């Protein structure tokens, strides 16, 4: 029956790994936590059950770009009853959507948006059959110190207590599973596929200086195919994109300070291959439906294996050979260390708040959110546990930099997975070569008057 429904609604003959099991668990009435590799088609896992049962779906998603991309994809596939409602919309746009909210089958929003009482009142009368937590690892990674609205998801899952909860992600540790079950107040039937993407080859390069690193990068992008380059800051995003542009390559920039239209334009240009290279912070890529990214370069490494595997997994979703390149100088360790210890809320802040000191408005608001769920001492234990976990992840990535061990196996061990790939694995296994997929220079270099004279004489 499932295969005929898959053909009817999506036109596919077969499921991808993990999709059929996830869909069946949902149709059997379970709350489901499904860990599927990047590019495995997680959206189908809730869309197909919704089509079969006719049930309405609330999708709680971490990023505006992710919501909008998924709605666009659904509309391209003929689905008219999907909408994303978020802070980037005008007051009039939000008002119009709210007026007809109950008519949509698929409704996307962020945890911050739905938690606001003046927004939540519009959702209360809708009989949701499914509540989807997209990119569910965010509940654990962000829910206690960065985006505390994620820690309050139980207010939604308990209000719609008859709705099934479907949590979907590509990377999850045992601790993250515990966090998600605690935050949602649900017990999940768990389905887990292997995280290893065998078509992605791992390379790591250590450099003596930033100049040496930049020189390597400019040489590599000549033949890297469609490429995402991840950096740690918005400032570096602009600096590096400028260097690449001056080298002659059309280059997109993506970070959190761009306005909605700028982000959407860059994303669309990259998906359509109008530009082949994106320089971005971690804000880019989650859920982006581009199948032919050939190279993911980390100019700066992230602070955890979970983030790294997520970002690397944006390469090669079409199954074709792809590569992950990480670049490192000793100076980068300072950046990594800073990011690993940059907590939205830490124990010092909690102690100061408890003693009556005035903190900035955002921190104060976030602490108040968390205190709705946990008393002070329990919250302190939670924050400490999160910081310990993040520090352990940071040290794991530090070891990746100097490791002589198989890089693929090392990363998978963090998720308690064992792999043994004998071909096209990593630089430490000595069985990989860099791809050779030419990128054409499209930026015409301006020639000065003096250069013209030199060319003539």
Image (cartoon, rainbow, N blue to C red):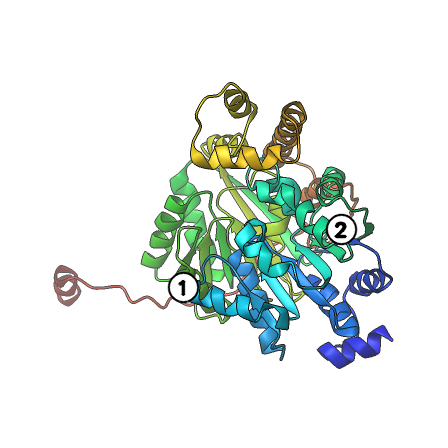
Badge 1 vs badge 2, beta-carbon distance below 8 Å:
no
| Image quadrant where one finds the N terminus | bottom right
Tag shown at residue 251: none
Q: Taking 37 as reference, is 192 left or right?
A: right
| Above or below for 67 versus 302 | below
Q: CA distance from mark 1 to mark 2?
A: 42 Å
Please tell me whether mark 1 sits on a helix, a strand or a loop.
helix
Q: Pinpoint residue 274: horizontal percent, then vertical percent.
A: 44, 70
> Between tags 1 and 2, which lies in front?
1
Q: Taking 455 as reference, is 306 left or right?
A: right
Residue depicted at x 55% and y 34%: 368
Q: Pinpoint residue 405: horizontal percent, then vertical percent.
A: 69, 37
Residue picked out by circle 2: 421
* Dot 1 alpha-carbon crowd within 10 angstroms: few under 14, some 14 to 19, many 20 or more: few
* Dot 2 alpha-carbon crowd within 10 angstroms: few under 14, some 14 to 19, many 20 or more: some
Q: Pinpoint residue 98: horizontal percent, then vertical percent.
A: 54, 66
Residue picked out by circle 1: 261
Q: Pinpoint residue 61: horizontal percent, then vertical percent.
A: 60, 55
Does residue 195 appear in the picture of this structure? yes
Residue depicted at x 65% and y 27%: 375
* Rendering quarter of residue 141: top right
Q: Which one is nearer the viewer's eye here, 108 or 91?
A: 91
Mark 1 or mark 2, earlier in chain: 1
């Amino acid at each position: 029956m499932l295969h005929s429904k898959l053909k009817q609604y999506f036109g596919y003959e077969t499921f991808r790994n993990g999709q059929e099991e996830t869909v069946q668990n949902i149709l059997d009435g379970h709350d489901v936590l499904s860990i599927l590799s990047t590019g495995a088609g997680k959206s189908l896992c809730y869309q197909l059950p919704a089509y079969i049962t006719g049930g309405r779906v609330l999708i709680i998603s971490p990023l505006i770009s992710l919501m909008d991309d998924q709605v666009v994809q659904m509309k391209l596939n003929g689905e008219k009853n999907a909408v994303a409602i978020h802070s980037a919309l005008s007051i009039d746009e939000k008002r119009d959507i709210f007026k007809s909210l109950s008519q949509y089958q698929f409704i996307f929003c962020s945890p911050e948006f739905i938690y606001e009482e003046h927004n939540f009142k519009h959702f209360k009368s809708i009989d949701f059959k499914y509540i989807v937590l997209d990119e569910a690892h965010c509940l654990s990674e962000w829910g206690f110190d960065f985006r505390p609205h994620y820690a309050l998801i139980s207010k939604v899952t308990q209000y719609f207590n008859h709705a099934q909860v479907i949590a979907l992600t590509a990377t999850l540790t045992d601790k993250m599973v515990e966090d998600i079950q605690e935050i949602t107040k649900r017990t999940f039937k768990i389905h887990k596929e292997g995280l290893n993407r065998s078509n992605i080859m791992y390379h790591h390069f250590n450099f003596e200086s930033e100049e040496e690193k930049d020189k390597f990068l400019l040489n590599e992008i000549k033949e890297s195919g469609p490429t995402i380059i991840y950096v740690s800051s918005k400032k570096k995003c602009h600096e590096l994109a400028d260097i690449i542009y001056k080298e002659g390559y059309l280059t997109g920039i993506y970070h959190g300070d761009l306005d909605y239209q700028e982000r959407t334009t860059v994303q669309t240009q990259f998906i359509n291959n109008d530009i082949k290279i994106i320089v971005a912070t971690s804000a880019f890529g989650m859920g982006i439906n581009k199948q032919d990214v050939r190279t993911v370069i980390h100019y700066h490494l992230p602070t955890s294996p979970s983030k790294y595997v997520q970002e690397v997994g944006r390469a090669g979703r079409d199954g074709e050979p792809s590569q992950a390149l990480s670049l490192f100088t000793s100076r980068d360790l300072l950046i990594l260390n800073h990011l690993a210890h940059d907590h939205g809320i830490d124990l010092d802040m909690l102690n100061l708040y408890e003693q009556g000191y005035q903190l900035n408005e955002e921190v104060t608001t976030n602490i108040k959110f968390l205190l709705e769920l946990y008393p002070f001492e329990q919250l302190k234990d939670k924050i400490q546990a999160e910081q310990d976990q993040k520090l352990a992840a940071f040290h794991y990535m530090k070891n990746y930099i100097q490791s002589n061990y198989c890089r693929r196996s090392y990363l998978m061990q963090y998720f308690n997975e064992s792999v043994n790939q004998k071909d096209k694995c990593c630089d430490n296994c000595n069985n990989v070569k860099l791809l050779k997929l030419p990128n054409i220079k499209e930026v015409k270099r301006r020639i000065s008057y003096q250069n013209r004279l030199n060319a003539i004489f």
